[in-house]
Image (cartoon, rainbow, N blue to C red):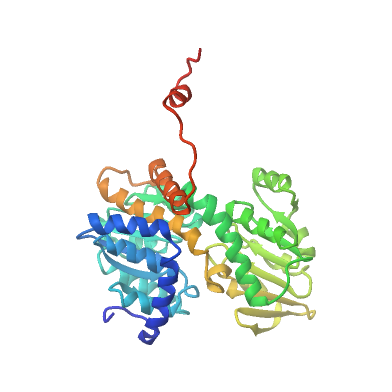
Amino acid sequence: MSESIIRDPGLTEQGVLKINWVRNNMPILNEIRKEFEERKPFAGKNVAICLHLEAKTAYLAEVIKAGGAEVAVCGSNPLSTQDDVCAGLASHGIKVFARHGCTDEEYKFFISKVLDTNPHLLIDDGGDMVHLLHTERRELLPNIIGGAEETTTGILRLKAMEKEGVLEFPMVAVNNGDCKHLFDNRYGTGQSTWDGIIRNTNLTVCGKTVVVAGYGWCGKGVAMRAKGLGARVIVTEVNPICANEALMDGFQVMPMKEAAKCGDIFVTVTGCKDVIRDEHFAVMKDGAILANAGHFDVEINKQDLMAMSKEHRKARNNIEQYVLEDGRLINLLAEGRLVNIAAADGHPAEIMDLTFALQALSMEYLLKNSGKLPNKVIEVTEEIDHQVAWLRLKSLGVEIDRLTEEQEKYLASWRHE
């Protein structure tokens, strides 16, 4: 723990309890851990992790360490870092550089401290670690075998780097894996976002109008859960395919300038900036609640909101209240950061079990294929995706059919008699 930079080592016991709780609810990672402990695939390797530092992430770091790696971690969001988990993780022999509520300067410093360990492999969330490696820490690039990215936002940044030809090592798009986006983005974001909104506002959702900005897999999950809670749901989109999906799923679709007039609760999940801005604040209801579930705090334009306000105050824990010139109140949750992690505990353990299993196995895949992969964004292999899915079914005691040899031949051939 002496090498770590954390807020309070006295929180160790509390953090260990949290980590133990998720360990008991992550059977896929437990199975992978057993294999890693026997084979030690990461022996002699350094692994850097930049993720939301809470209990599920902590256990992923422990699983990687069980495979023989030296592991260093930092947080990917200042408000999602849990200080007790940091203390618990540091007590288990992992280097931790993170504090809840750190400044922007400290945030960057912590990432750099993780990179000081000269990593061979890395796991990123949003692309900040990869960005620092390609700008200010380029001396470390020759040692990097590859990495994996957790989020849609991070993959967009990586794709832009790939297009410009500046990406210096292969990155696995874990977010695109079926066992990630079909479950984590939809069911995980759907549940944890409403967990964050409800626990901090202590208000009902039923009977209210919820506006969901973005109908990707995350937006689908948020809208589905809002409907289940009894809300009327409006979806805003820029993609005509996604807009048609929302319509066929039974939701109303309209531009944000119209939705802003009737929404009670707004949730942004687009990955883009300025989704809700001055023209939308100008027509919102008194008491409107704004939450973001996209990676960065740019989807709700806080600068516009502040400029339009005559007063800004804390209304409740994790709720900032902006008083507009005409007296209307607009409530912003978690400073516009990820409401499900900055103001709640993030996705359920069983959901992150799937995602982090992909991360762990992708690390091993990169190591096995060191020097053979292009410096591009690489999809999760079907073999890894299916391995994780089978492990989940096994942990649940669920059996499914398997193709017979004749069925496999039938599906593989175009010559049918």
| Residue 409 % position (x, y) | 43, 23
Image quadrant in which you'd find residue 62: bottom left
State left or right for residue 396 relative to residue 223.
Answer: left
State left or right for residue 111 relative to residue 80.
Answer: left
State left or right for residue 352 relative to residue 249.
Answer: left
Q: Would you place residue 151 above or below residue 197 in this image?
A: above
Picture residue at 34% right of the left edge, 55% below the top: 32
| Residue 145 % position (x, y) | 27, 53
Q: Residue extending furthest left?
A: 44
Image quadrant in which you'd find residue 232: bottom right
Picture residue at 39% right of the left edge, 43% below the top: 381
Closer to the camera, 160 or 11?
11
Closer to the camera, 228 or 333?
228
Image quadrant in which you'd find residue 261: bottom right
Residue 77, can we see it? yes
| Residue 40 % position (x, y) | 23, 57
Residue 99, can we see it? no
Closer to the camera, 375 or 148?
148
Count numbered badges in the picture.
0
| Residue 164 % position (x, y) | 41, 48
Picture residue at 75% right of the left edge, 62% below the top: 230
State left or right for residue 402 relative to residue 182.
Answer: left
Q: Quadrant of the N terminus?
A: bottom left
Q: Would you place residue 334 above or below residue 118 in this image?
A: below
